[in-house]
Amino acid sequence: MAMRRHQRGEDAAAKEGEDTRQGFEDVDDLKNVSKEVRVAGDPWFRGWCGLDLRSVACLRAVLAFLLLVDLGMRARNFKEINCDDYLAPTGYSPHGWIVHRVLFYRGGVLLQFAIAVFQAFVLLAYLVGYRTDVTAVLAWLLTTMMHGRNEWVNNAGDKVATTFLFWLMFIPCGEYFAYNKGILHRPGVQYASFGTLCYRMQLIYLYLSPMYLRLSSAASNTWTWAKANAVYYTVHYTTATPFGTHVVGHYPRLCKLFTRVAILLETVGAVLLAFSPSQLLQLLLVIGFWKLHMGIALVVELGVFPFISSVSAFGLLPSSTWDTKVVTGILHSQPARLVAKLGCSVGKVFEACFGRPAPDRKQSKLSFLLERWLAAFFLVYFPVTILGYLGLIKQPDDGNLAEALRVTQRWPMYSPNAPFSSVWVVVEGKLQNETYIDLMQVWRNGWSNSRKRWVHSNWRPSTIKVQRPMPTPHAVFPNVRMSKFMIYNMDAREDAKRGRLLTRQFVRYMCRQWDEKMKPGKDNMPRLLTVSVFMVTQLTLDPDSNPPSIYGGVHAREHLHGTWSCDSV
C-alpha cells in the first residue's frame, strides 16, 4: 500500500519540480522564501483540519531519528530481545493471529541481525526523505515487527511510535526536510484530508482516554490522582531517576502542583492542541506538551518513551512557526548546515544504490479514493474501539482489526492509579562451594567484566539483601527494557502460566550465561547449581497522612515459582 499522496495542480507541481536540483544545499535561500501558504489535499476539507507539510516532515525526521536511537539501544541486549531461547522461550508467542506469528518470528541471530540492518537502512532513508511513499510503509511494518518479537520488553512509547508511523502513511511527509527537495526553500503547503483529521484525533485519544480512567467515577480506586499525589508516587517508583526521587520527591507540595498541571494539560490542553482557535495558542501548547514529556524524562527512566511522546505533536506546529527568526536562525546555523549536507550525501548514496525517485506525479483517482475512504473508516473505527476499551460500549469486533494492525487504542499510562509501591527483583544463585551470590549484580556489571574482577581481585557479588537499592530500585536492572521484562511479566500475580514460563526461561538464560561466560572449572570458578528469583515490594506511604516518612518498609518478598536447578531447566 504505497501512499502517493499530495494532489496538486499541474502548474504547482511543475514549479515544485524545479526545486529538486540542489536538495539540502539550498539552505541559503531561506530568506527568499514566500510566506504564502498554499492549500492542498482533499477538496472536501477546503483546508480545514490541515497540517503544514513542513511540520509533518519535521515530525517524520525526528521520529525516524529517535527510532534509530532506540534500535541502537536495543542492540545492547540484541540476542535477549530478538532471538529464541534467550529471554523468550523457543516457539512461544502470545500472538493468536497467524500473520503475526509469521511477522514476529524470532529465530536465530543471523536472521534477526539481517532484519535489524535492513530496518536501520529503511529508517535512515525515511529520515533523509528518500522515497517516503515506500519507506513510510516499511518503517511502520519493520518497527511493528521489532516490537512484536518480544512484547515483554515494550513500553507505551513503542506503541506511540508505531501509531504515529501508521498515520504518517496517510499524509505526504517527504515534501520538506528531504535530501532532494530542500528544507524550507519553497512556500508552505497546508494539507488537509481524513488522514490529517485522524492525526489530530489521535492526540486526543492519547491523552483523554487515560485521563478518563484516572478521574471518572466508573474507575475504582483512583485516589493517587484525586488527591493530586500521582507525581509524588511516580518519583518514588522503581523507574524513578535519582533526580526524581531525591530532589523532586522531597517536595510533596511541588508534586501536587505538577500533578494538577498534568491533569489540566492532558484534558483541556489536549483538546485545544488538536483544534486550537489560534496559531499562537497552538504553538504554546505544542511547546507545553514537549516540556511535559521532557519533565517526565528528568524524573522517570523510560528510555526513548518520553522523547517520542514529546515530538508526537510536532505535526501541529503552525505555519507561522517556520517564518520566525528563531527557526530561520537555527536552520541557518553551522550545525544545521552540516546536518543538511550529511543528509544530502546519504540521500545520494541511496539514489546510487536504488535509483533516483520518479518525479512527483498527480495522484491517480483510484489511489486518492482508496486513501480517502480508508482513513475515513479509521476515523470512525478507532473512537468505537476506545469507547469499548473504556467499557462504555461493546466493541463490534472486540478490537480485532486494531490488534491486527498493531494500533490498539489502549493507553493506560499510570491509570487508574499511579504506582504506589516500588518493585525490584533479587536473583539468588547457589554455587558449588555452598555460597550464595547476587546474580543481578553479575548481569548488571557484564559477564566478562564480572569474571575478570572475580579472577584478578577479591571481588564477589554481594550476598542477598532485600533492602531498598540505592540510589533507586531501578539500579538493580541492566536497563529499562530488562526491568520491564522482569517486573511486569515474570510476576505470577499477573498471569501465572506466563509468569512461570518466562521465569523458567530467565533462569535457563542465567545458568547458560554462567557456563558460557564465567567458565566454571577454570581459574577455580565454581559451578552455578540453583537459582531463586524473588520479587520484593516496598510501599510508598501517603504524603498527606505520613509526611515525615516516605517508605513503609518491605511490604512483601515473593519467591517466584520456587528454586530452580540449572541441571533441569
Image (tube, helix red, strand yellow):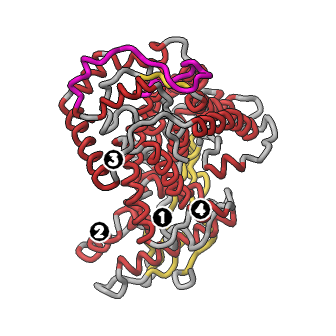
Of 69 and 561, nearer the camera is 69
Label 4 and label 2: CA atoms lie apart by 27 Å
Label 3 and label 4: CA atoms lie apart by 49 Å
Pair 3/2: label in front: 3
Label 1 and label 4: CA atoms lie apart by 18 Å
On the image, numbered disc 4 is attached to which residue? 490
Question: Given contact means CB atoms under 8 Å apart, are the residues at marks 3 and 1 in contact?
Answer: no
Q: Position of residue 555 (x, y in %)?
A: 60, 51
For label 2, the SS is helix
On the image, numbered disc 2 is attached to which residue? 449
First-in-chain label (3 vs 2): 3
Kindly identify the residue that appears in the image at 57 percent across and 83 percent down: 568
- The relative height of residue 329 versus residue 441 in the rendered view (above or below) is above
On the image, numbered disc 1 is attached to which residue? 82
Estimate how packed mark 3 is, as few (under 14), some (14 to 19) or many (20 or more) residues with alpha carbons within 10 Å: some
For label 4, the SS is loop
Of 158 and 62, nearer the camera is 62
Quadrant of the rendered structure where residue 477 is?
bottom left
Q: Position of residue 365 (x, y in %)?
A: 59, 35
Kindly identify the residue that appears in the image at 44 percent across and 84 percent down: 432
- Whether residue 48 is in magenta: the answer is yes
Amino acid found under the numbered disc labelled 4: Met
First-in-chain label (3 vs 4): 3
Amino acid found under the numbered disc labelled 3: Arg
On the image, numbered disc 3 is attached to which residue? 356
Pair 2/1: label in front: 1
Part of the protein shown in magenta:
26-53
Q: Can residue 404 be seen in this view?
A: yes
- The relative height of residue 36 versus residue 171 in the rendered view (above or below) is above
Kindly identify the residue that appears in the image at 42 percent across and 40 percent down: 63
Quadrant of the rendered structure where residue 291 is?
top left
